[in-house]
Image (tube, rainbow, N blue to C red):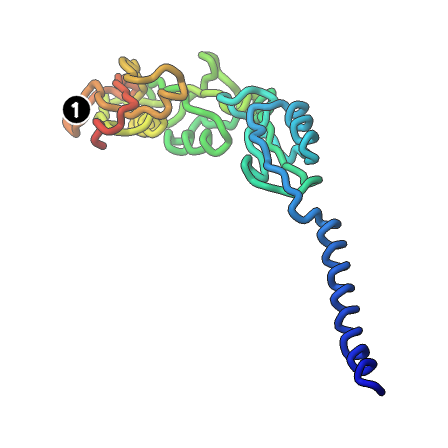
Amino acid sequence: MTTGKRLFWIIAPVVLAAMLLGSAWLWLAGYTRHGQTEKVPDLRALSMEEASATLLKLGLKAEVIDSVYNDEAPKGTVVSQDPDSGKFVKRDRTVYLVMNAVQPKMLNMPNLVNLSKRQAISVLDIIGLKVAGMEYRPDPCMDCVVAQLYQGAPIAADERIRKGEAITLVLGKGQQGEQVPVPDVMGMGFAEMKAVLDLASLNLGLVVEVKGCNTGCDTALAKVVRQSPSPGPDVLISPGGLVDVWLTLDTTTVTP
C-alpha cells in the first residue's frame, strides 16, 4: 500500500467523525434554539388576558397555577410569576402565574366562645381572620370569650364569612375590678403593636399622627414613636381600655 493510501485511511475516519459531530452539534443547537432567549417581562398588576398577550408576542406561554386574595393588589391581576421578571428563557417556555382572586375565600366561622383570649386570637390567626377589637363585660372568667361579634352583631359558629374579615371578641372581665398594665409598644410596627395590645387585653385607640404617611400601605410600614397612656408596670387601666399612638416613617428616630 502506498504512503498516500495509508494516510487516506488514517485521516478519513477522523474527518468523518468530525463531520458527524459538527452536524450533530448544529442539529442540537437548532433543536434547543441555542442562543435564542427572551427576557421575561414584569407581569404583575396585569390581567390574565394582558399577561398572555404580552408573553405571546415573545413566543412564551402563560399558565395560572394558583390564586390568592390580597386587598392591596388589583383584583383579577398577576401578583407573582415564575420565572421572575428580568430572567432570560428560551422561546416556548411557560411562565407560571399566581393571580389575585376577585373575591376572597369563604370560611366557616369557628366557635370561639369559652376559649381563652390567647386561644381565640390564635384560632383567628390560623384560619385567616383578624381581631377587630375587644369588649369586656362582667363574667367570673377573666379573659374568657363570652361572645363573638362581626360588624357589631353576633356571628354563629359555622356561619360563612370572608377570609380577612375582623371579629370582635367579647371577653369576661372578672368580678374583682381587675386592671392590666400598659405594654411598651414604642418602636414597633403597626401589625406588631396591634398584636401586643390584643394580648395585653387592650384596644388600639386613635392613631393621632402618622408622619410621612399618605396611604394605608405607608401606615403599615410606620413605627410607633409615642403612646398614651405611657407604658409601665405601675400604669394600670381596665381591660379593653384604649391606647393612642403616634406613628412615623422616619425609623432612624425610633428607639425600640
Q: Position of residue 33 (x, y in %)?
A: 70, 47
Q: Is residue 243 left or right of residue 135?
A: left
Q: Which kind of residue does numbered mark 1 sit on? A: Val
* Element on which disc 1 rests: strand
Between 113 and 232, the one lying in front of the other is 232
Q: Which residue is rendered at x = 17% and y = 29% of the image? A: 233
Q: Which residue is rendered at x = 58% and y = 27% of the image? A: 78
Q: What count of labels does the image hold? A: 1
The C terminus, quarter of image: top left
Res 255 visible = yes
Residue behind mark 1? 235
Q: Position of residue 46 (x, y in %)?
A: 60, 23
Name the residue furthest right.
Answer: 1
Check the image and report above or below for 194 versus 62: above
Q: Is residue 256 left or right of residue 82?
A: left
Check the image and report above or below for 8 versus 149: below
Q: Position of residue 155 (x, y in %)?
A: 51, 18
